[in-house]
Image: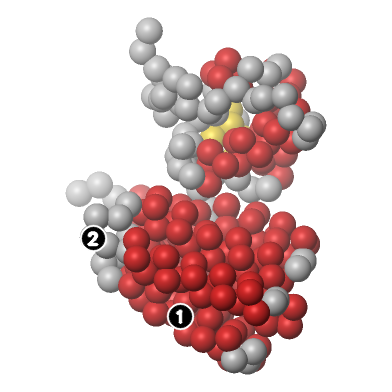
Amino acid sequence: MSTPANSIAISGLIAPVGRVAAPLREQVIGRLRQAIREFELQPGQRLVERELIEWLGVSRTTVRDAIRELATEGLVTVVPQKGAVVATPSLAEAEDLYEVRAGLESLIVRRFVERASDEQVARLTATVDELAEVTTDQTTIRELLMAKDDFYVVLVEGAGSAALQQLLESIQARVQVLRATSLSEKGRPMEVVRELRGIVDAIGRRDAESASALCAVHVRTAAITALSHLRAEQAATLSPAS
């Protein structure tokens, strides 16, 4: 039997949920959230209940609860007559999310400077070195995102704030497709490395003001590329057929 268009296309894409300490509902939400962040579930893709039930090995109620939670997070959109689909931010939403992200990441950097140990500063610097090493013409966007996410893992750990971590993860998940768009711009990955080096250099000097400001510039620079692509897509969609 053929797979319906825009549904989950790879059998076994999402592994069944195992027996671990976390509540089953939270496991399912986490698994779907990860699949969206890692583009195993693509923007605009339908989330077919029966397929998720089969592959996750959970009940219909659990799947529906998870979809409702992801909808509140902005990761899933429930479309009348179509069902749940992986959300794609509108231009207005993306503009706001990037501006919030700039302020949030700047605050996280400031907290990192205030609270992180010297060992954590060294680890943060190492993540930028590792990103530079993997950044080649052959590196996939997914690999670049994963390497850059290592930077954020150390950053939020050193900032020592579960609340800021939760907020950052939510926003980054919602703009993941735009992060990928920005990194796909020719020359942008090496610019990212240079920008992050500037941030970690300021952090190493324990200069919270400079590090925070450089972080805001980094996010807003990424936004310029991502939002320009989104505007072009929107214009193409709205323009009449020739």
Q: Is residue 147 above or below residue 64?
A: below
Hey, which quadrant is residue 187 in on the image? bottom left
Q: What x and y, as percent, mark residue 12? A: 48, 22
Hey, which quadrant is residue 184 in on the image? bottom left
- Colouring style: secondary structure
Disc 2 and disc 1: Cα gap in Å?
Answer: 20 Å
User: What residue did someone put label 2 on?
Assistant: 137
User: What residue did someone put label 1 on?
Assistant: 197
Q: Nearer the viewer, residue 7 or 32?
A: 32
Give the residue drawn at x 53%, y 81%: 200
Residue 153 marker: none
Q: How crowded is mark 2: few (under 14 residues within 10 Å), some or many (20 or more)?
A: few
Q: In which quarter of the image is the N terminus?
A: top left
Query: Disc 2 marks which amino acid?
Result: Asp
Q: What x and y, as percent, mark residue 232? A: 34, 61
Q: What x and y, as percent, mark residue 153? A: 60, 61
Tell me, yes or no, whether the two marked residues, 2 and 1, touch with CB atoms within 8 Å: no
Task: Provide the secondary structure element on which disc 1 rests.
Answer: helix
Give the residue drawn at x 47%, y 77%: 196
